[in-house]
Structures are given as structure tokens and as C-alpha cells.
Image (cartoon, grey):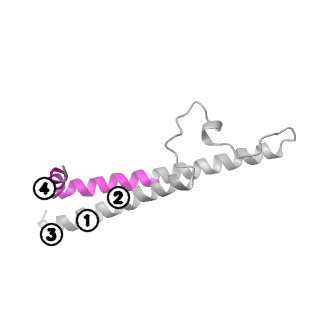
Amino acid sequence: MFEKIFDIFLGQPRRMTNLGEVMINLGYWLGVAGLIGAVATKAVGVVHSLTPQSSVTSAPTLAEIYPALPTGWVPESIAGLLITLTIFMLGIWLKRTGRQIERLVGY
């Protein structure tokens, strides 16, 4: 299986560069969505804490704030942030490696 993957990427290194660009963009937009989600949860938590009849002690999650939207892909925790950072860094590595292979092969 790995031989097939190597043949695909080494046969046309531009595929590796394009995959790297897609992963960089994915990591970037996941990070932006996570930042917006963190701001939204903090803002709703502050508003809930200011109301006198509030019995909520913890900050709400995005699923509680937006129950009709699919928010499972938004990184809300440290683990999600690490996964997003890993996707971003893997994209940078793939793009750089693809460009180096393009130079070596002469594409």
C-alpha cells in the first residue's frame, strides 16, 4: 500500500505540494473556527454569569449554544487544538517536501 502511495506522489510531486496546501488551509480554517468558537463560548458564559437567576456554573459548549449546527469539527479543547496544529504542520512539511522533490526530479 505504501508503495502505491509513494508511486503516486513521486510520479507527480505536484500532488504532494497540492495536498500540503490543502492541509495548510484546513488547519488554518479549523484554527480560525476554534478561535471564533472560543470567543462565542466565553461571551455566552459571561452573559450567563451576569444574570441573577443563572444557575449554570460552567461555560457552555458550542453544541449547547448552537444546537442546530454541526459543531463537532470545531476544536474546542487542547486535544482539538493539537490535532489542528498537527494537520497544519503536516501540510507545511508536505508542501516543502513536494517542492524539494520537484526540484530534484526537474518538474
Secondary element under disc 4, as helix, strand or loop, is: helix
State which tag comes first along the sequence, 1 or 4.
4
State which tag comes first along the sequence, 4 or 3.
4
Secondary element under disc 2, as helix, strand or loop, is: helix
Which SS type dominates the magenta stretch?
helix
Circle 3 packing at 10 Å, graded few (<14), some (14-19), many (20+), is: few
Q: Which residue is mark 1?
A: 97
In the rendering, which numbered label is found on residue 91?
2
Q: Which residues are magenta?
A: 3-28
Q: Which residue is mark 3?
A: 104
From the image, which quarter does the C terminus lie in? bottom left
State which tag comes first along the sequence, 2 or 1.
2
Disc 2 to disc 1, how far (Cα)? 10 Å
> Residue at point 61% right, 41% down?
62
Q: How many marks?
A: 4
Residue type highlighted by circle 1: Thr
Residue type highlighted by circle 4: Gly
State which tag comes first along the sequence, 2 or 3.
2
Circle 1 packing at 10 Å, graded few (<14), some (14-19), many (20+), is: some
Secondary element under disc 3, as helix, strand or loop, is: helix
Secondary element under disc 1, as helix, strand or loop, is: helix
Q: Relative to 97, does residue 66 appear above or below in the rendering? A: above
Q: Which residue is mark 4?
A: 11
Viewer-closest of 59 and 101: 59
> Residue at point 19% right, 58% down?
13
Disc 3 to disc 1, how far (Cα)? 11 Å
> Residue at point 15% right, 50% down?
4
Are the residues tagged 2 and 1 within 8 Å (C-beta)?
no
Residue type highlighted by circle 2: Gly
